[in-house]
Image (cartoon, helix red, strand yellow):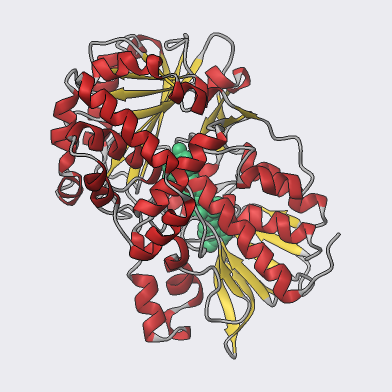
Amino acid sequence: MIENDVYDVIVIGSGVGGSACAAILSQAGFKTLILEKNNEIGGACSSYFKEGFIIDRACHIIPIGIKGVIGKILKKCGLKNLVFSKKIGTDSAVRLLNSDYIPLSFAPNDLISLDQFKGLFDAFGFSPEEQTELINVVFKILQYPRSKIRQMFETKIILSEFLDKLTNSERVKFFLSWFNGLMFVIPPTQTSAAEFLHSFQEMVFKNDVSYPMGGCIAIPQAFIEGVKKFGGIYKPNIEVKKILIEDNKVIGVELNNGNIINSKIVISNLNIKQTVNKLVGPKYFDKQYLEKVNSLKGSGSTIVLKIAVDKVIIPNYSSVHLIHTDNFSKIIESYKDWEKMEAEERIPDNPVFMVPIPSNIDKSLAPPGKQLLIFGSGGIATSEKRNWDPWIERYYEAILDFHPEIDDHLIFMDITTPSPNTGKIKASTDLTSYRGNFMVEGTSLTPDQAGKYRISSQLPIEGLFVVGDSAGTDTHGVGTQIAADSGLKCAQYITSKYKMKTH
Ligand SMILES: Cc1cc2nc3c(=O)[nH]c(=O)nc-3n(C[C@H](O)[C@H](O)[C@H](O)COP(=O)(O)OP(=O)(O)OC[C@H]3O[C@@H](n4cnc5c(N)ncnc54)[C@H](O)[C@@H]3O)c2cc1C
């Protein structure tokens, strides 16, 4: 039972952006109600419990943990209990088929002592000249002045053009484009070069690539603790059906059970397109605004295989990257046509996997002697039902090429697909039904959608806002970061506009 008419703010959804925004507003003295349709907190950044394992719904490496915007929000709310392990930043590895794991570190000190990359360069077929070139290019990127990056947001240059100006080496360009893909899940022909530089520099200089102890859910969970600490209320298993508008002002929300809760401020954590078209309804917006929202582009999506095994298969690293070829040039060739591959819905012959190993970071995430391996790889971006079986089968087969022993030690494999699977294999989560959105990042970081060109959190209806990875002018970074940044900035705007007392 929810008391009516007493809330200053209603937040719809407890993803990173929604829970961050709700925490800051509660701390600022707003009586806040946060409604979540699922049983668990966190949307794409959630985790669940199964047979002694704590399993992330998706597949996450946190590019900046406590030293970034997430840490800032925790500090502002006096929440010191969330601990990030930095092991991912300093304890990762890359492996090609038929080779060993090659250590890889994201820490600036290690980038300076480049000896550790020797094995990687050799395996990737970099000639000595190309190695020198890669080092030069990375240093140029790291030294690029902030003032120039700000100008680049204005000139809207794309990453591939920027890299073309920096180097002629296809291998160097591809290597950085691969990194860009890991960060923003779009090809370099679409990424804002300014956003890439901004986020890459921050990630390297802050040296805080990490993973939350307790699994990914620990981040939104900590924010929800902040909400409660300052008197706010969190309600799971409540789906909002409509945002109610009168005279171009928000008046509250209608729940799926028909109940109405009033509030003059409503913040939606759903993607901006769904908020406008579904929760509010297009008739409340003018044609120009609707066109702007409906033309926003999202990032690509992923398929995630979460593999629980009864022995430790990969003992040494916190995260690994598997590249299914013994010849890196083949990958360069096959991924040149990324956009075409997506349009043709092709399954990659040589998939590439990002593999966080949460139980190597936090032992409590798996029973003793067992291991949790999370394999994230490309899946076409669609909310339509689809037969995902061929992707799942291909990916599992490719994983076994690296670690055949997994098959004998498998306890279970949970699968996350972008949309519902019509095939025979049961997917435990589909992102569209679970989170309402199949994309890794709701509004992708193209030049028209980055920095000051990013769509505002403030909608053209009094009291209505959207937070998360789909909206927020001048918000930056990879998924969880940009979602948290959006939540924080929107809360700061609301606090200043509605002038509530601060604690
Ligand atoms: C497979 C995958 C891999 C990723 N990898 C990374 C990574 O390595 N690093 C990184 O930083 N980021 C990564 N991301 C991105 C990151 O997870 C997201 O950008 C971020 O978590 C999105 O947060 P959000 O605030 O937009 O909310 P969302 O996660 O979109 O949450 C929205 C919330 O609203 C709720 N909701 C929806 N409709 C309703 C309704 N009608 N009523 C009530 N509640 C509702 C949903 O249940 C959900 O909880 C990844 C994402 C995916 C999917």
Q: Is residue 12 above or below residue 307?
A: below
> What is the quadrant of the C terminus in the image?
bottom right
Residue 396 seen from this side: no
Q: Position of residue 274 (x, y in %)?
A: 44, 66
Give me the residue at 19% from left, 24% from top: 328
Q: Position of residue 112 (x, y in %)?
A: 45, 24
Q: Position of residue 95 (x, y in %)?
A: 31, 18
Give me the residue at 23% from left, 11% from top: 98
The answer to whether residue 240 is left or right of residue 455 is: right
Give me the residue at 33% from left, 62% from top: 156
User: Which residue occupies the foreground of this view, 264 or 429?
Assistant: 264
Q: How many marks?
A: 0
Q: Is residue 223 above or below residue 32?
A: above
Residue 459 seen from this side: yes
The answer to whether residue 120 is left or right of residue 492 is: left
The answer to whether residue 32 is left or right of residue 86 is: right
The answer to whether residue 304 is left or right of residue 398 is: right
Give me the residue at 46% from left, 45% from top: 199
Q: In the displayed image of the protein, which residue is found farthest to the bottom?
A: 247
User: Which residue occupies the foreground of this view, 50 or 368?
Assistant: 368
Q: Quadrant of residue 377?
A: top left
Q: Position of residue 1 (x, y in %)?
A: 75, 62
